[in-house]
Amino acid sequence: MTKKITLSLQDSLFIGFCATLLVALTGMLRLKLGLSGHSMFLMCFFYLICYGVLRRFGSMTACGVIAGIVAMALGVGKGGPMILLKFALPAVAMDLVALVLPLAMNIHWRCVILGIAGCIAWGLKVALTNILAGMAIDAVLIQWGFSILKGGFFATLAALLVPPVLARLQAHGLLRLDKF
């Protein structure tokens, strides 16, 4: 007998809400900061909120794929079909790393490690785009390193904001702890 794990309607709606809000804020706040990686702030924040609230494997991946599909449908950002990779690749990486992290680890460290893992995967999308554009491999590696460094800064900032938000949700009784 296999136990089927399904998402409730409430959980599915929350994932869709996070994904849509991520795309809407990304589209509205099209900040030209001149800094590579500032998009990792919103991505990391919403994926980690999804993970912290639902506490389920696949919640970040579902949020990332839905966000990518919504972004493609609305034409947010540049890159065409690669926009799906921009949103989905970090989410998949964060979900896979979450599987190997011990549950006893401090939530702050867990969020930071997951954010950095997502940033590395996000950098792979940048590297893949540069390779497809015909850039030399040594230049791709240097650009990838800079992308990870800059994106890692924003991912760490977002990851450090998640535990206080989860604590506030818990204090108001909005988190269900029966999901573990």
Image (cartoon, grey):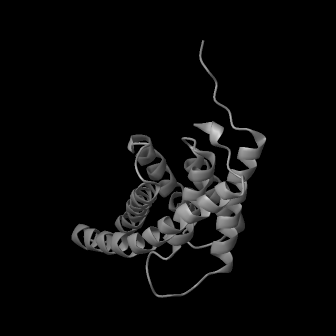
- Image quarter for residue 155? bottom left
Residue closest to the far right:
9
151 or 101: nearer the eye?
101
Q: Is residue 19 toward the left or the right of residue 148 in the image?
A: right
x then y, percent, for residue 166: 60, 58
Q: Quadrant of the C terminus?
A: top right
Residue displayed at 43% across by 79% down = 36
Question: Closer to the camera, 110 or 23?
Answer: 110
Q: Residue at x 49, y 77 (%)?
A: 38
Q: For residue 69, which quarter of the picture?
A: bottom right
Name the residue at 60% across, 73% down: 77
* Residue at the left extreme, as displayed: 138
Q: In screen coordinates, is 159 left or right of 139?
A: right
The relative height of residue 72 versus residue 13 in the rendered view (above or below) is: below
Q: Is residue 17 left or right of residue 68?
A: right
Q: Residue furthest front?
A: 171
User: Relative to the observer, which residue lies in front, 98 or 30?
Assistant: 98
Q: Height in image: 147 above or below 171?
A: below
Residue depicted at x 38% and y 76%? 150
Q: Left or right: 146 with respect to 90?
A: left
In the image, residue 58 sits, relative to residue 151, either above or below, namely above
Placement of 75 over or under 6, stated as above or below: below
Percent position (x, y) of residue 46?
59, 62
| Residue 1 image point, x, y percent | 60, 12
